[in-house]
Image (tube, rainbow, N blue to C red):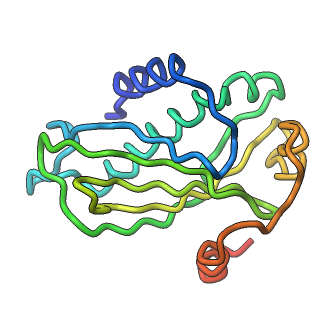
Amino acid sequence: MYPIFRLLRVIAKSKLQKKIAFDSAHNESINLRVLPQDIDLFMELNNGRYVTLLDLGRFSYGAKVNMGNFLKKNNWSLTIVGTYNEYRYRLRIFQRFELQTQILGYDKKWFYFFQKIVKDGKTHMASVVKFSYTSKKGLVSPKEVTEAMGIKYEPDQLPDWIQDLTKHLLFKK
């Protein structure tokens, strides 16, 4: 089941915190705990639940940049286009952890988040999330989005490691 109550709590808390700019300089962070509904038969955080919990970090970031108002004003929504995930260490039931979210930037077609789950200074899971804005007509180009945000359009300013990663993914278009 989707963690709707956690999501509502994260959004409410984030809306009350200081607003931030939509840029790559800010690393948004929330603290969570592995709950019984998150675990698999090995009593650890299920790999699919990791990905679901990443939503909470993106919603927290969105609340702090006032994304809801921006989407409503433009009659747009967001869609996840793809993720690349790596898992390193297990998280057991009831362990606390930190979910960090950062916008990496955009290229000519997509926007990118980098998210990681950290406990005691060790990265347990990391993910690159590719996403897009959408309208009733389909995908909205990053150029149109940045113009609506009042941000100078500068595609391909992504870190080299993201550009290298995207060259090797299954769906290049």
- Furthest-left residue in this view: 42
Quarter of the image that includes the C terminus:
bottom right
Could you tell me how many numbered marks the image carries?
A: 0
Q: Nearer the viewer, residue 128 or 173?
A: 128
> Picture coordinates of residue 78 (x, y %)?
67, 40
The residue sitting at 83% across, 63% down in the picture is 155
Vertical placement of residue 102 versus 3, above or below: below
Quarter of the image that includes the N terminus:
top left
Q: Nearer the viewer, residue 93 or 22?
A: 22
Q: Nearer the viewer, residue 136 or 120?
A: 120
Examine the image and state in which quarter residue 95 appears.
top left
The residue sitting at 65% across, 31% down in the picture is 65
Vertical placement of residue 76 versus 23, above or below: above
Q: 73 left or right of 110?
A: right
Q: 154 left or right of 41?
A: right
> Picture coordinates of residue 107 (x, y %)?
77, 64
Q: 143 left or right of 171?
A: right
Q: 92 left or right of 30?
A: left
> Picture coordinates of residue 76 (x, y %)?
77, 33
> Picture coordinates of residue 154 (x, y %)?
86, 60
Vertical placement of residue 31 versus 84, above or below: above
Examine the image and state in which quarter residue 77 appears.
top right
The residue sitting at 60% across, 83% down in the picture is 168
The residue sitting at 82% across, 36% down in the picture is 136
